[in-house]
Each structure stands twice: as structure tokens, then as C-alpha cells.
Amino acid sequence: MSGRPLQVAVIGAGPAGIYASDILSKSDLDVSIDLYEKLPAPYGLVRYGVAPDHPRIKQIIKALYNILKRGDIRLVGNVEVGKDVSFAELHEHYDAIIIATGADRDRPLNIPGAQLPEVYGASQFVYWYDGHPDHKRTWPLNAKEVAVIGVGNVALDISRMLTKHPDDLMVTEIPENVEQGLRRSPITDVHVFGRRGPAQVKFTPMELRELGEVPDVDIIVYEEDYQYDEASEEAVNSSKMKRQVVNILTDYLLDQAEEKTASRRIHLHMLQQPAKILGEKHVEGIRMERTALQGDGSVKGTGEFIDYPVQAVYRAVGYFSSPIPGAPFDEKRGIVPNSGGRVTDGPDGEVLTGMYATGWIKRGPVGLIGSTKSDAQETVNNLVADFNAGLLHATTNQLGWHAMENLLNGRGVRFTTWKGWELLEAYEKELGAKAGRERIKVVERETMTAISRGEKHDGKLY
């Protein structure tokens, strides 16, 4: 393979794929990297999975932008692997593939009543308010009282977006259809439920602190939920982050003496697990079982049940990855099976040469951006080691982007590029400027694609 660059395809242009591409581009290898993304725009869950009122999102996107704008990593958007091109075709034309497609589905909630129409997955609501082009434009915001199951940051994002007044979101990039939907919402109360105690919640301190700063929204907590066992005390003493979270929760508890006058409320309930969603044809309430800590941080049901009147339930109990047709996938764990990022297959975990994984598709939906970076480093280190061992070879002489561009054009696939993203970004900022905002997202996929490619759509030439 002397005399030509190593040809690598990365699937997924979210943080995992971009960080892996960046680390690989800075290695000692002579490498050509093509970054494939099924959406017309990059950044993955940073653009489509985090609430728009987080200022730190801009800093993450700025870092990802600075990587891609260098031009040494080719962005190929609006191309879905398994639909527009097959995984086998990528494997044929590239020396190595890195799968970085993240986690895009919700874990199920397996309790009676979970099939009722007003029981929603967290990701679907997040995709709606973030303007994901492949998800519906409307959302049924009809409930006055809502239950959110889960005590991670996604649960807080959902609770905050449900209760925050739309006028306070108009400095963000929320699309017009989201603004209109939120203005019609009759919401008054959101109940957030966690199975364990204050020391076991998964909120980060900043997210939890921000919750108490939302205008005209009161935080309600309950003294009976503040219980600790030996493992809880140990967790608080050994983790600065846990200690900060418990301190913030304690501040909320001490604040309960003050009169609550806000028009909307977020109730934080701990030591309760869902037993049943009530109602025959529609959600009418949720039955929770009180739990008790067992000394090791785990909990056990007590047999005491509490019914709450709610008209909708959002399950924020974790994300789950989707398989890529043609690539190995562990349906139980929701990951691509791997060893240190090297993709494996079969009962004996045989390593498949030239195939790698990174990010949530590799390790499951846990960890923040720092974990994603270290994850990518491990995967790229093993890829480089395999190259140095002479293991990486494409199976054809038609290599990399030259072969794939011909294939995509031949199939009429309207792929987008980094230049196209810059055009779309400029358009979104122009929309925002007209409304006195930094940006307004373009939501519809065909419009996004037309803007990125300078095409005509709905009678308008972009």
C-alpha cells in the first residue's frame, strides 16, 4: 500500500465521529478521511439532542466546527449507510471503517400501561424541539400535569423545556413550529421520578442548578425523599460532583419554607419507581411504588403505592443505539460488539479486520464529551496499530472518495458537503437576524438539502 494514503470512512458526524477523525488526522499516518452523515447537517446529538437553551452547546459546536473547517476531513452529508450505500460497499472501497453513529432510540419502559398513546420516549420529544428533519413537526402538548421517569440530564432538559415560558426561549434557535407548539401548552406541573435517593441521581450540578433559575417555575422537593445509606454517604464523600448535586438538592429542600407563587412547578421525587400507568384508552395517572435504600445504594420496593394525576408520561430511562444493516450489532446491549474499539462478531468474539467503533455505539449511552474523546483515542490507537501490523487493505483498487463520489452520483444521491453546511449555517443565521436572534433552525430536510446544494425547492432558488 506504499505510495497512497490510508483510506478511512467514518460513519456519523456527531462528536464521536468528529473527534475520532481529528485524532486520526493528527496521527503519524498518511490518511484520507471521509466522514459520512445521514443528515444534511453535521454535529449529531449536539445539534439535535440537547436542549437549545444551553449556552455551552455553542462552545462544543465551535470546537467541532474548528475541526471540520480545516478541510483535511471530508464531510459527506445526506448519505445513509445501509440505504444510499451499503456497509459492504464502504468496506470494499476503504481500508478501514469507524462506526460512530451514537444512540438515537429510547429504552423501553416495561410496565402496564406503557402502550398508551400519551407515553412518549424522551428522544422523540427532544428531536421535536430541536427541529430534527426526520421527525414530526407537531407535538401533542395537551397535558396540564406530566410525569418524567428518570433522573439524568435528559429528564431535566425535558422538564425545563415543558415548563419554560416560550418568551424565555426566544434568544435560542428554536424553530417557529416549536415556539407555536409551546405557546399552546396548558402545562402547570411536571413530576420527575427517580428510583433511588439523592446520592444516586445522575444530574450534573450545572444542569440541576440551572433548573432553579428558570423564570416563573418553582422547584418542589419532599423531605421524605432525602434518605441516605452507607453507600450513599460513601458516594458523596468520594465524589465532588455527587457532593455538589446533594448540596444543590439540599438547598432546594431548605428553600421549601418560602411561599411558592410561580405559575408552573417541577416536582423532584426520589425513592419511587413506576408500577403502572393508569387509564384505559388514555393516560389518566401514574402509580409509583415507594422504595427503600438497602445499604449498598440499591433499592427495594416497599409495597407502598402513590397515585399521581398526570395526562402524559415521558420516559427518560436511557438511549439505545440502532444497527447499521450489514454491520454486527448486539440487540440486548444496543452496541456494536467490540474489543477496545475493534469490531467483533460471532460467539467467540472474532475481530473483524478493518472495522472499528467509537462513542455510544461502542460503549453504550453513558459519559460526557470527555469520555467520547478518550474513547476515540483508544479506537484510533488500535486502528494505527493494525495499520502498522499490515492488516488494513481495501478489497478493490477503486478507493475512497473517488469511487464513492461516482457511486453516489450514479445513484442520484444528493449528498451535501462542508461548503454546503456553511451555506445552510449562513441561511439560518440570516433567518435569525431578521427576528433579532442569533439563528433559527431550518427544519425540513428537503429545504436543508436544497440550501446546501444551491438547488431550487418550492419555487425558490437557494
Image (spheres, grey):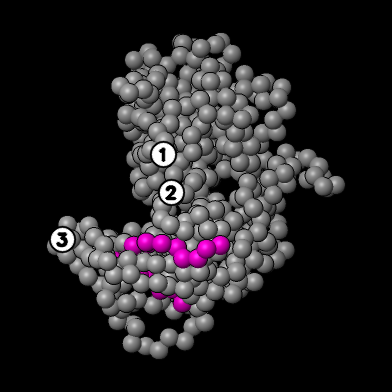
Q: Which residues are magenta?
A: 265-281
Q: Is residue 38 left or right of residue 271?
A: right
Give the residue furthest to the right: 459
Return the disc, 1 or 2, that comes first in the chain's sequence: 2
Return the disc, 3 or 2, that comes first in the chain's sequence: 2
Quadrant hosting residue 288: bottom left
- Say which of 447 and 385 sits in front: 447
- Residue 365 shown in magenta: no
Q: Say which amino acid is labelled 2.
A: Arg
Q: Position of residue 319 (x, y in %)?
A: 44, 48
Return the disc, 3 or 1, that comes first in the chain's sequence: 3
Q: Position of residue 225 (x, y in %)?
A: 28, 72
User: In the structure shown, which secondary structural element does the residue marked by tag 3 occupy?
Assistant: loop
Relative to 33, residue 320 above or below? below
Q: Is residue 209 visible?
A: no
Label 2 neighbourhood size at 10 Å, few (<14), some (14-19), many (20+)?
some
Q: Are marks 1 and 2 in contact (CB under 8 Å)?
A: yes
| Mark number displayed over residue 107 | 2
**Residue pictured at 27% horizontal, 66% vertical:** 303
Q: What separation in Å lies between label 3 and label 1 (alpha carbons)?
A: 30 Å
Quadrant hosting residue 306: bottom left
User: In the structure shown, which secondary structural element does the residue marked by tag 2 occupy?
Assistant: loop
Q: Is residue 93 visible?
A: yes
Q: Say which amino acid is labelled 1.
A: Gly
Q: Which quadrant is the C terminus positioned in? A: top right
Residue that badge 3 annotates = 295
- Residue 280 shown in magenta: yes
Residue that badge 1 annotates = 334
**Residue pictured at 49% horizontal, 15% vertical:** 394
Q: Position of residue 223 (x, y in %)?
A: 28, 78
